[in-house]
Amino acid sequence: MSKRDYYEVLGVDRSTDEKDIKKAYRRVAMKYHPDRNPDDPDAEEKFKEATEAYDVLMDREKRAAYDQYGHAGVDPSMGGGGFGGGSFSDIFGDVFGDIFGGGGRRAGPQRGSDLRYTLDISLEDAVRGTTVEIRVPTLVGCEECDGSGARKGSSPVTCNTCAGMGQVRMQQGLFQVQQTCPTCRGRGKSISDPCRKCHGQGRVEKSKTLSVKVPPGVDTGDRIRLSGEGEAGPEGGPAGDLFVQMSVRQHPIFERDGKNLYCEVPITFVDAALGGDLEVPTLDGRVKLKIPAETQTGKLFRLRGKGVKPVRGGSVGDLLCRAVVETPVNLNKRQKELLKEFQESLGQGGDAQSPRQSSWFEGVKNFFEDMKP
């Protein structure tokens, strides 16, 4: 199945900058995170698809290669950079090197694959920072054979088919091309007496526990690179890296947007009309918020310095509290009578106490008047 366009996956266009790409990924990742969609078998695939798109579009070199060559430009089988970063020249040399005087490359230890681990953390840990232990399944060098793949006491020998080149030349009509050696599969060496533990692979599967230090201020989509903690390379080659990608869980009270936090604060009808003092939560504890008289639903109160300090530096954000006037429920008979008395006390001058309602009805009246022929 062909892959979807990375820009389409994140819902952005080709001119979108890195900041908006990050925001777009955060929305998609939050929507399709497997933990939030346990009954949706497609959610995990969509989450992985979005993560792959984010990985490419946030890397300038990968993005440039993708913009020019599409998925082929970032296909790992093409060297991770498509035709944009030297892979094309390698392929060109492998296939047509003999015609233009080029030669094959001698095989050698290859670097292990990079790994990615999605770390699910709370908003509090993301803001304050934390240290987390994770368990990662990976391939590590075989201790029995020191990663060589050969039984202890023996060693790999140069492949007789390719003479250690890892490639063989084949004649196809007028052309002479190079292909991966079928005997050693490009390694340049063969093992006559393989290690019993790793069966000649030089690597074994193992889960290892790692301690990850999460810096304060991280957000969904941020990555922490652990050098050399990826898969071990074949034949003793260097290990790849482990990329720990952050996924911040949805919070029951706060919503984060960059360095600012938002929350809704329900206030009573009386406090909204007469004013009052309320205690509101912050990540550092409770603080008092003064509610002025005649407060309407939707009014924002800014608590400076109660947001997030960005992981890449800068000033601390703010906490913005949105007032929501709550209508009283479960009223008893006397309370209903008091409200009716209050309503009657407004009399004909009620418009002065409800200016928005008055202007809204006036707008509705004008709307229907304009519709008349």
Image (spheres, rainbow, N blue to C red):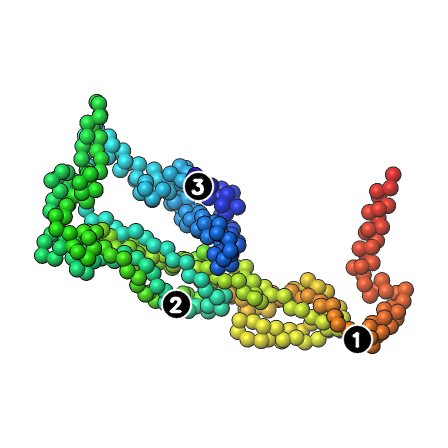
Q: Position of residue 248 (x, y in %)?
A: 48, 61
Find disc 1 in the rendering and name its residue: 332
What label does residue 132 carry, if any? 2
Residue at the extreme right of the image, as rendered: 348
Q: Residues within 10 Å of mark 1 (few under 14, many from 20)?
A: few
Packing grade of label 2 (10 A; few <14, some 14-19, many >=20) is few
**Numbered badge on residue 23:** none
Task: Tell me if residue 293 can be seen.
Answer: no
> Label 2 amino acid?
Val
Q: Of all residues shown, which one is farthest toward the top? A: 174
Which label is found at residue 3?
Answer: 3
Sequence-wise, the earlier of marks 3 and 2 is 3
- The residue lying at 59 percent from left, 64 percent from top is 262
Secondary structure of residue under mark 2: strand
Q: Secondary structure at mark 1?
A: loop
Residue 57 drawn above or below residue 276 = above
Which image quarter is the C terminus in? Answer: top right
- Between the C-alphas of marks 1 and 2, the distance is 52 Å
How far across and how far down the image is residue 189, in percent? Answer: 15, 45
Q: For mark 3, does the 10 Å Cα neighbourhood hold few (<14), some (14 to 19), or many (20 or more) residues?
A: few
**SS at circle 3:** loop
Asked if disc 1 and disc 2 are in contact, CB closer than 8 Å, the reply is: no
> Please, what is the three-letter code of the amino acid marked with disc 3?
Lys
x and y, in percent, of residue 167 in the image: 19, 38
- Discs 1/2, front: 1
Q: Nearer the viewer, mark 3 or mark 2?
A: 3
